[in-house]
Image: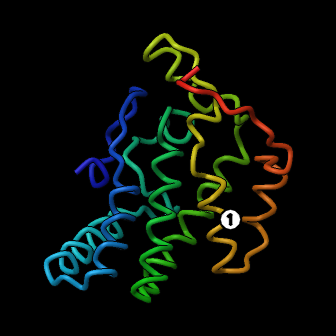
Amino acid sequence: QPFQEKTQGDGGEYVGLGKTLDGLIRFAAHTSEPKLLALRRHVVDVLLAAQEADGYLGTYRPGKRITCIWDVHELAYILFALISDWKHFGEDRSLAAARRLGDYLVSALAAVSLEAIGESARRFDGESIVAGNALVGLDRALLALHRVTQDQRYLDFCVEKLKVADWDLPIVEGRH
């Protein structure tokens, strides 16, 4: 329902559909269980019907997209799940939707400072949530999209905007 209505935007909403769908797709592909196959098809059908013309496939209302905490994270894992659907079930419509979503992400994120991502979280829970937390999964989703499409824009975005080659973060036990 939140993906159909697109009314969220106060900063703390997170559904986790992308991760759940990716797991469902892989489980259905591994087991070939008819109920899982039917559920996968239903979720993909409903999700793809909710994709907007510009490629957006999240839950946030216009004006709150991208910079609100967890929007990009959710979109990244939806992108990853759509690629999984194409890989495991040959669903060309899922790959086409993934490309539209990838294009949306690259375009929308090119226009904002990555440090602004998650700003709403600082207002939402009073903690300092860095952009990296809100962008978890984006790099691997765009790299996966690059691998299956060979579209250089996705790789360039990871290198130039996300600067993944410069990542050498310490391992931190716990949130902080």
Residue at the spot 25% in from the left edge and 77% down from the top edge: 41
Residue at the spot 43% in from the left edge and 15% down from the top edge: 125
Question: Which corner quadrant of the image does residue 145 belong to?
Answer: bottom right
Residue at the spot 51% in from the left edge and 64% down from the top edge: 80
- When the figure is inspected, residue 91 is found, relative to residue 115, above or below; the finding is below
State how many labels appear. Answer: 1
Tell me residue 109's x, y (percent): 67, 46
Tell me residue 26's x, y (percent): 37, 73
Farthest top residue? 126
Task: Give the residue type that dot 1 points to.
Answer: Leu
Pick the front one: 167 or 68: 167
Name the colour scheme: rainbow
Pick the front one: 128 or 53: 128
Residue at the spot 60% in from the left edge and 63% down from the top edge: 102
Secondary structure of residue under mark 1: helix
Left of 128 or right of it: where is 146? right
Question: Which corner quadrant of the image does residue 166 belong to?
Answer: top right
Local crowd size for mark 1, using a 10 Å CA cut-off: few (<14), some (14–19), many (≥20):
many
Q: Which residue is mark 1?
A: 143
- When the figure is inspected, residue 169 is found, relative to residue 93, above or below; the finding is above
